[in-house]
Image: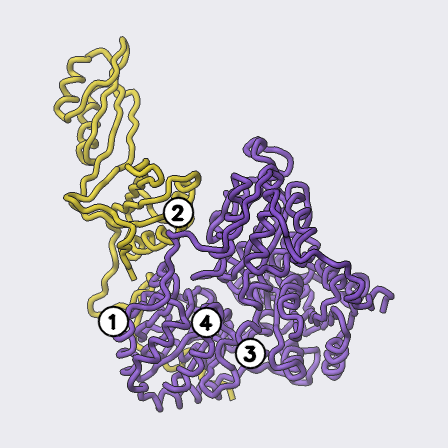
């Protein structure tokens, strides 16, 4: 004799959301995406950037920017990865990064961490004096000038660069190139591979 | 029966004497082979080719037994199955280009099931790399997402160490496939460097013990549970934790369900066993997982074939998740009590910390009621046409208790999971995560090489069998005593079942009325072939196939109308499993 049909079976009252998180029906909460700055210390070897970037693409993390460069130690490089993800996605990105063999350590930087990016902005060269004046307002400098064009370098936070680019729109902007963010924690705190965080 | 069907067993006296391993390292290839011997590799599965020739040449002097497969995919699956059965990494070898790409499916399969596997691939000489040279592919690039780690060997002095590290990584922590790409000039190049013993890199840090305070908290939740349940996954096999799991479940009297890779981790004959959960799991297991209040998941990644829709999975339960890979914690199902560590050790920790067993008499009674209400069964109005479930059940009764079952992928795989009674770990060898049709024939070869004294039974479907049927030639050449059972319904049956259930019966490209007669094909390969059509012949045919000393193929012509139930539709609610087509319409 077969047991009860689907609609007559014992059912619990609980529920989970689509992220697999058990929810309180009284106070249903969902995680909104947030910006997270991950800093990864990796072995400075061929293929590591490709490994990290392909991890991010195949796991569908919403990546904002990724920069990489050598550190004071010739054998390691430091990556700064900015992602916009709900909380579970941020945690998952950190854990998946840590699994990669060339990755020595991964930390999420506090929101107060120093974040800098660089932009080179090429504008038409008919008002070089005005261009230099605007550049100085943003702590930047004209780094190349020719008869037809002036190129300005601006360094700073994403917001500052956004604002500078807006200001340069009064000139005829020919080309813009921006790096992603490079970031470091404030104060004396450094990333130490012997004190791996555990995010369970 | 053809003459070749009884190829005599090779007389051990006739086998030419082998050198007992590499004695001197003068080339990169010899260093590669020395690394393998040092790691304890006994068997290799592979296919020769241009770029890998120097390595094979060094293998000529080795103690490692090489099994030449018909296709590289077969080599990867055989090595994968060898790894499952023995717990030691299996070794697959292929040449560059197409050899390497043919391995890809097998490597991906091993990755999804966290099976220990090492792939060695030939590569064009470093001067040619990047030039689209003959038989060149970017093998490390292609396999990056499906390996735990891969290596491009760039120096003859260090190539042996690359192989050693690949070996260590494949078997340590969360197991998985690794690959070493071997450019021809590197393997031919001179070196006198003996490889170092296998060792994982320093950045690879996998925890063994879970945090004590986390264990305490989890144990408190478990002690207070009214409806506790254990979910045993493939990680229990990998960490050899089956004994610990059994004794813990018995001591605390907690019912146990398994995932598909977890089959055999808890004996299905045990009163506490509710069987396999998930899409084609038992009614009892799916009712229990839906209604439990604390779920102790051990060595599982909460795959969607297990959970169904995550919003309806164990919706009332606190989840205790024992897992060696931190990235699996809260990936699919949020863990309330994450216990990161090796399953064997963490189960010991939990066992030590438990003071009171949960009071769950009523819950156990309820689980028992579900077992009685939803037995695995099939309708046999007049026993005809032949029912696949009956074939599996009968074979199970006749086979040795510790027989190893391997499968292809499809309906037959589910019947083999449902109607065979698993009692021991490492007796279920299947493509669980990737679902690779064609896994059956070569995996049985790898399993038999890994466990030569154990009975090996391979269930396959006609569609799946056709995908790697050429590997039968290997089973014949090696005279492997394997019984293949093709549950032949002239279709990719699982697809047809879905088309009937969810695509209004529009059977696009799922019916195979042109499949060959597999018994005759088996004879052509030199194996023994049997055709099985009548229910009354099942026992006799199986016994004859079992008694044949060599590979035998039973072409079992089964009822094409038979489908796999219970079933939870993809992304559905485990508690609302369908027992038949009418139920499917209700949910």
Q: Residue furthest right?
A: B3
Give the label, 1 or 3, closer to the camera.
1
Disc 3 to disc 2, how far (Cα)? 40 Å
- Residue under disc 1 on the same chain as residue under disc 4: yes
The chain under label 2 reads: A
Image quarter hosting the C terminus of chain A: bottom left
Q: Residue at x 19, y 21 (%)?
A: A141
Task: Look at discs 3 and 2 and give the one toward the viewer.
Answer: 2
Q: What residue did someone put label 1 on?
A: B213
Q: Which mark is on residue B236?
A: 4
In the image: residue B562, left or right of residue A46: right
Q: Position of residue B34 (x, y in %)?
A: 59, 52
Instruction: Tell which circle, 3 or 4, labels the residue nearer the N-terminal end.
Output: 4
Location of residue B509 in the rendering, given as x and y in whole percent from the top left corner:
64, 57
Q: Quadrant of residue B539?
A: bottom right
Percent position (x, y) of residue B511?
Answer: 66, 61
Q: Is residue A121 above or below residue B510?
A: above
Image: A99 above or below B404: above
């Amino acid at each position: 004799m077969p047991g009860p049909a689907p609609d007559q079976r014992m059912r619990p009252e609980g529920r989970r959301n689509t992220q697999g998180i058990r929810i309180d029906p009284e106070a249903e909460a969902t995680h909104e995406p947030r910006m997270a700055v991950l800093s990864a210390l990796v072995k400075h070897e061929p293929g590591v950037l490709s490994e990290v970037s392909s991890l991010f693409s195949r796991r569908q993390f919403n990546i904002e920017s990724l920069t990489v460069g050598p550190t004071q130690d010739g054998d390691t490089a430091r990556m700064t990865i900015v992602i916009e993800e709900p909380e579970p996605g941020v945690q998952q990105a950190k854990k998946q990064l840590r699994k990669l063999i060339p990755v020595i350590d991964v930390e999420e930087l506090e929101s107060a961490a120093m974040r800098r990016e660089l932009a080179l902005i090429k504008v038409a060269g008919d008002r070089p004096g005005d261009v230099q004046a605007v550049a100085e307002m943003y702590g930047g400098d004209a780094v190349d000038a020719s008869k037809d064009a002036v190129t300005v370098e601006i360094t700073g936070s994403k917001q500052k660069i956004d604002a500078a680019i807006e200001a340069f729109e009064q000139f005829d902007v020919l080309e813009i190139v921006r790096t992603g963010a490079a970031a470091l924690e404030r104060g004396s705190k450094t990333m130490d591979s012997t004190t791996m965080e555990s995010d369970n | 029966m053809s003459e070749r069907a009884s190829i005599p067993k090779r007389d051990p006296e006739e086998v030419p004497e082998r050198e007992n391993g590499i004695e001197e390292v003068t080339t990169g290839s010899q260093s590669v082979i020395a690394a393998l011997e040092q790691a304890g590799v006994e068997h290799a599965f592979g296919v020769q080719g241009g770029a890998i020739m120097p390595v094979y040449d060094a293998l000529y002097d080795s103690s490692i037994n090489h099994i030449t497969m018909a296709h590289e995919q077969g080599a990867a699956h055989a090595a994968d199955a060898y790894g499952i059965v023995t717990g030691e990494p299996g070794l697959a070898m292929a040449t560059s280009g197409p050899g390497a790409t043919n391995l890809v499916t097998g490597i991906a399969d091993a990755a999804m099931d966290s099976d220990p596997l090492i792939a060695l691939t030939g590569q064009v000489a470093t001067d040619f790399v990047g030039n689209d040279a003959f038989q060149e592919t970017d093998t490390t690039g292609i396999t990056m997402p499906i390996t735990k780690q891969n290596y491009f060997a760039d120096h003859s002095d260090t190539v042996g160490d690359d192989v050693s590290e690949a070996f260590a990584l494949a078997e340590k922590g969360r197991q998985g496939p690794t690959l070493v790409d071997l450019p021809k000039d590197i393997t031919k190049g001179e070196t006198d460097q003996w490889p170092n013993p296998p060792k994982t890199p320093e950045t690879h840090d996998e925890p063994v013990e879970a945090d004590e305070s986390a264990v305490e908290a989890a144990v408190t939740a478990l002690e207070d549970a009214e409806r506790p349940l254990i979910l045993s996954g493939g990680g229990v096999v990998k960490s050899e934790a089956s004994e610990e799991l059994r004794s813990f479940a018995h001591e605390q009297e907690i019912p146990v369900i398994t995932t598909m890779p977890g089959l055999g981790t808890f004996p299905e004959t045990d009163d506490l066993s509710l069987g396999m959960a998930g899409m084609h799991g038992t009614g009892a297991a799916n009712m229990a997982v839906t209604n439990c209040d604390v779920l102790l998941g051990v060595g599982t990644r909460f795959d969607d074939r297990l959970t169904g829709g995550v919003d309806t999975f164990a919706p009332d339960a606190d989840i205790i998740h024992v897992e060696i890979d931190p990235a699996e914690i809260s990936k699919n199902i949020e863990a309330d009590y994450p216990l990161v560590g090796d399953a064997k050790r963490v189960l010991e920790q939990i066992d030590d910390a438990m003071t009171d067993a949960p009071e769950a008499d009523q819950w156990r009674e309820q689980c028992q009621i579900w077992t009685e209400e939803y037995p695995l069964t099939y309708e046999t109005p007049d026993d005809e046409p032949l029912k696949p479930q009956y074939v599996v059940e009968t074979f199970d009764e006749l086979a040795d208790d510790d027989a190893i079952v391997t499968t292809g992928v499809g309906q037959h795989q589910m019947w083999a999971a449902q109607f065979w009674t698993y009692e021991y770990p490492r007796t279920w060898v299947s493509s669980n995560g990737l679902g690779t049709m064609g896994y059956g024939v070569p995996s049985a070869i790898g399993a038999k090489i890994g466990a030569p004294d154990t009975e090996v039974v391979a269930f396959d479907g006609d569609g799946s069998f056709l995908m790697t049927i050429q590997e039968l030639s290997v089973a014949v050449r090696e005279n492997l005593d394997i019984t293949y059972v093709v549950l032949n319904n002239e279709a990719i049956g699982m697809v047809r079942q879905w088309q009937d259930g969810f695509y209004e019966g529009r059977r696009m490209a799922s019916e195979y009325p042109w499949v060959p007669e597999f018994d005759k094909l088996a004879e052509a390969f030199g194996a023994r072939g049997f055709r099985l059509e009548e229910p009354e012949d099942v026992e006799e045919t199986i016994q004859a196939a079992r008694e044949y000393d060599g590979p035998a193929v039973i072409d079992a012509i089964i009822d094409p109308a038979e489908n796999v139930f219970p079933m939870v539709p993809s992304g559905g609610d485990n508690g609302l499993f369908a027992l038949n087509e009418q139920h499917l319409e209700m949910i």
